[in-house]
Image (cartoon, rainbow, N blue to C red):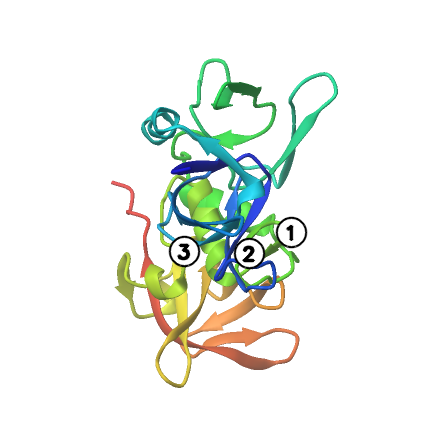
Amino acid sequence: MNYGISGLSIIPLRKDPSERSEMTSQVLFGEHFEVHEQFMGWCRVTHGYDGYEGWIDQKMITELSERAYYKVVNSPSAVCTDIFNIIPVDEERTLMIVAGSTLPCWRPYKKEFSVNRDVYQMTGNFTYQAPIDVRKFIIQQALMYFNVPYLWGGRSPMGIDCSGLTQIIYKQAGIQIPRDASQQVHLGTAFSFVEEAQPGDLAFFDNEEGNIVHVGIIWEKNKIIHSSGKVRIDNVDQFGIFNVETKRYSHKMRVMKRLIEPEE
């Protein structure tokens, strides 16, 4: 096996080939990957969307031939924007997918997508091209995750970490960014003052050693949507995130970045 795709709603991507191993990320439905190594029922893979590496239980993999893999890679795709969506497979079976799932081999006029020879009809909301108002769309989608629990390595509405939230929301808006906050911080154009922020800009926060450890989506000039314990809305200023419940600063500001190009 050299190539695979997620035919399940969510597949855990683990640090080591064991169910007890730390989950470092997730592969959502329709996301493809390359398989580099097989060991005791596990496969070491590279995620096609963000290059993340890890181990997947082989039983969870939908295998792709080389031809099918490159068809997925080179064909247009759409992205599910419903928090949850139930897609009919046949008269007896359904498929549940979550926001951020990829709809591979997309046929826009039929609103169909396919995995291998299985063809599915998309009945819910999706993005195929960039939204007209990208900033408004990013905030709208981010607010749908409000109160979703924090989960280390999570990228889904059932549990998500801080950089998983920013990556998946941007994915729904048609903007591809890396998996980790420490990678995302290298993108875009920096600006210095919260007063300059626009909805959808990203803010990054560091620890005492100066390492980037947190990221969130700026909503209004003094509000931020981020995953810390849960997806929440807090105040933000030049010092960092001010938790509205504890009345204390929880994260120290490092830099704010603009990844969305200004309109002409």
Q: Give the total of numbered labels.
A: 3
Examine the rendered structure and indicate whether residue 7 appears above or below residue 246.
above
Label 1 neighbourhood size at 10 Å, few (<14), some (14-19), many (20+)?
Answer: some
Query: To which residue does mark 1 refer?
Result: 158
Tell me where residue 53 appears, x and y as whole percent: 40, 54
15 with respect to 130 (left or right) = right
Tell me where residue 11 appears, x and y as whole percent: 56, 46
Query: Which badge, 3 or 2, comes first in the chain's sequence?
Result: 2
In the rendering, which numbered label is found on residue 171?
none
Q: Kindly state the secondary structure of the residue where label 2 is placed.
A: loop
In the rendering, which numbered label is found on residue 154?
2
Query: To which residue does mark 3 refer?
Result: 179
- Residue at 65 percent across and 60 percent down: it is 149
Dot 1 amino acid type? Met
- Residue at 29 percent across and 47 percent down: it is 262
Quadrant placement of the N terminus:
top left
Residue 51 visible (yes or no): yes
Quadrant placement of the C terminus:
top left
Tell me the distance, in whole angstroms, between the alpha carbons under discs 1 and 3.
Answer: 18 Å
217 with respect to 46 (left or right) = right
Dot 3 amino acid type? Arg
Residue 102 visible (yes or no): no
Tell me where residue 205 appears, x and y as whole percent: 41, 73
Tell me the distance, in whole angstroms, between the alpha carbons under discs 2 and 1.
Answer: 8 Å
Tell which residue pokes out farthest to the top in this image: 110
Tell me the distance, in whole angstroms, between the alpha carbons under discs 3 and 2.
Answer: 11 Å
Tell which residue pokes out farthest to the right in this image: 92
Query: Which badge, 1 or 3, comes first in the chain's sequence?
Result: 1
Dot 2 amino acid type? Gly
Label 3 neighbourhood size at 10 Å, few (<14), some (14-19), many (20+)?
Answer: many
